[in-house]
Amino acid sequence: MPVAILAHDRQPATIPLPAAPRGGSTSRAGPEAPPVERAEITSGLLRGSACLSPKYFYDQRGSELFEAITRLPEYYPTRTERAVLLRHAGAIAQTVGTHGVVIEPGAGSCDKARVLCRLLRARQYVAIDISADYLQGAVARLRAALPGLDAWAVGGDITAGMQLPPGIAARDRLVFYPGSSIGNFDPPAALALLQRMHELAAGEGGGILIGIDLPKDVAVLQAAYDDAAGVTAEFNRNILAHVNRLIGADFDPRQWRHEAFFNTAESRIEMHLAACGPQRVRWHGGERDFAGGERIHTENSYKYPLPVFMDMLARAGFHAPQAWTDKRGWYALVHARA
Ligand code: AVJ
């Protein structure tokens, strides 16, 4: 449902959209995902209320669509986080400390790390991501921009308890987790992830710097996840094209409608895809019938009140928390010591 957005935020929708892949969305080749992932995806699809993990948004086109989202007038988190970092740069550098090691799980393009590593005069930077291939290029660009920085690209999943290479200094580690990515996890999983980050930063002088999207006017939240240009809708539907390739399914993304709303009781944005009509979806080794209007839950994006998040940090073992926000109080960068 489209929601009115603040008048001064409205701009002509001139964001160029990445082109849809040619040759239709149905995969005729075999499933591309390894068996464990295929099992995870199909069990989600077979559940009473079907769901897919938001990690499957990010194929090539999905990553491009997310980039386009971050430039939308309605999507405030990315530019607000940048504003918070610039507004409080001096205080952040002073609190966090300079010349340390910046470790960024889920680093992606490393764009935010460039600003932070420069600000903190970091000595080492470690980008961690599940897809190490994509990381290599991003880390190479970072090295070119900051020649004094010892930058590493490490493939792995910190939720799975991976170890860092021995070349990474053990002291003065700062785990950097920007973008309010923590909002994608439900509170127990978020706590477990913070505990893992605490282990990574446990040496002397260690800490965390994390981006938190705060609760705010529901119309602002809903517009950010249901933009006028329909980019978020396209991003949401694209998960089906990706899943088609991963499990050899025959979803028709055009037969699914984007839905985004704020669930007040859970303090989270929910994104769903609703079937435009009854349909049968088949994949290698299974199938499911969906009734018209039946939904697949694709994402939660939790909006934590600052005290609630501070409490979670404490339960993960962190102390001495400090938060910086923008003028409107929409977004916080939080630092805490391990
Ligand atoms: C990348 C998980 C932080 O929740 O705001 C953007 C993803 N989904 N629009 C978010 C997203 C729809 C984003 N995170």
Image: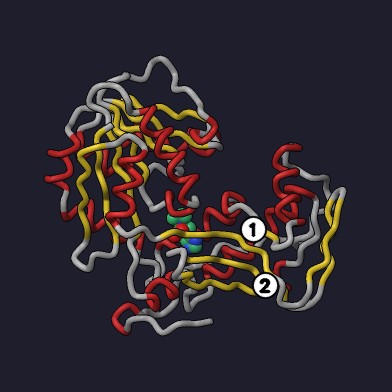
Asked if residue 67 shows in the view, the reply is no
Residue that label 2 marks: 274
Left or right: where 243 falls relative to 249: left
Disc nearer the start of the sequence (2/1): 1
* 2 vs 1, front mark: 2
Q: Which residue is drawn at 30% across and 38% down?
A: 208
Q: Residue at x 41, y 15 (%)?
A: 166
Compare residues 229 and 161 and report the one nearer the observer: 161
Q: Which quadrant holds residue 118? A: top left
Q: Do the residues labelled 2 and 1 touch (CB within 8 Å)?
A: no
Q: Which quadrant holds residue 131? A: top right
Q: Most extreme residue toward the right, as rendered? A: 285
Describe the element under mark 2 as helix, strand or loop. Answer: strand
**What amino acid type is highlighted by mark number 1?**
Ile
Examine the rendered structure and indicate whether residue 115 appears above or below residue 205: below
Q: Which residue is drawn at 81% across and 75% down?
A: 278
Q: Return the x and y of residue 9 as percentages of the image width and height.
A: 32, 77
Q: Residues within 10 Å of mark 2 (few under 14, many from 20)?
A: many
Examine the rendered structure and indicate whether residue 73 appears above or below residue 177: below
Describe the element under mark 1 as helix, strand or loop. Answer: helix
Left or right: where 239 falls relative to 171: right
Residue that label 1 marks: 239
Examine the rendered structure and indicate whether residue 167 appears above or below residue 256: above
